[in-house]
Structure formats: C-alpha cells, structure tokens
Amino acid sequence: MKFSATLRFAAVLASFVVVVALAGKAVAEPNSQITILYDAFGTDAAMKKDWGFAAHVEVAGKRILFDTGNDADIFAANVKAKGAGWI
C-alpha cells in the first residue's frame, strides 16, 4: 500500500514537472495554453476539488492531457465548468 502511494506521488510530481517545463516554453509560443482541470488546491469556486491533478497543455499546435485525477465524475464536471469541450 505504501509503495502504491509513493508511486502515485511520483507520478503527480513528474506530471507537475513536465507541465512547469512546458509552461516555460509556452511563453515563447503565442497560441500556447495550460488549462488546469483537476486539483486539490485551486481557487476557482466553479471547480470541484479532489486529490489528484489534471491539466490540458497546448503548445505549438500539439495537445497533451495529463491526468492523475481520482474521480471521472469530478473530472467531467470540471471540464464542463471550464468550458473545455475540446477534450
């Protein structure tokens, strides 16, 4: 059980590092965007909070969805709240 929690934490941390790295590149790309879709600590009242992280990253016309969220229903509600119908 402890290994599973450690593995999940490592996956979330790795995803965060990749998103941050892409965010640095996003500054140079005028059509780049990062949309946070699932997290535990956000301030957007329309978003449901839960342990996990999901972000839609768009850089240079490429789209990547990082999703380590815990609940598909919360993810779907947050996608709708963000108006992210493109996912």
Image: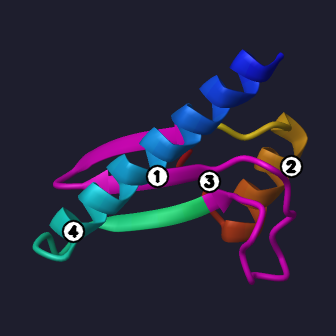
Q: Secondary structure at mark 2?
A: helix
Instruction: State the CA–CA distance, disc 3 to disc 2.
Output: 15 Å
Residue 54, x across and y down, in percent = 61, 49
User: Dot 2, how many residues are within 10 Å of its Cα: few (below 14), some (14-19), or many (20+)?
Assistant: some
User: Dot 1, how many residues are within 10 Å of its Cα: few (below 14), some (14-19), or many (20+)?
Assistant: some
Q: Amino acid at mark 2?
A: Ile
Instruction: State the CA–CA distance, disc 1 to disc 2.
Output: 20 Å
Q: Nearer the viewer, residue 83 or 20?
A: 20
- Name the residue tied to disc 4: 24
User: Dot 4, how many residues are within 10 Å of its Cα: few (below 14), some (14-19), or many (20+)?
Assistant: few
Of circles 4 and 2, the one toward us is 4
Residue 75, x across and y down, in percent = 77, 47
* Contact? badges 1 and 2 (CB < 8 Å): no
* Depicted 49 relative to depicted 85: above or below: below
- Name the residue tied to disc 1: 16
Instruction: State the CA–CA distance, disc 3 to disc 1.
Output: 23 Å
Q: Residue at x 72, y 75 (%)?
A: 42
Q: Which mark is residue 85?
A: 3
Q: In the rendered structure, which disc, 3 or 1, sits on the residue that comes first in sequence?
A: 1
Which range of residues does the magenta coloring cover? 37-66
Q: In the rendered structure, which disc, 4 or 1, sits on the residue that comes first in sequence?
A: 1
Q: Secondary structure at mark 1?
A: helix
Of circles 3 and 1, the one toward us is 1
On the question of residue 67 being in view, the answer is no
- What is the quadrant of residue 24 in the picture? bottom left
Q: In the rendered structure, which disc, 3 or 2, sits on the residue that comes first in sequence?
A: 2
* Contact? badges 4 and 3 (CB < 8 Å): no
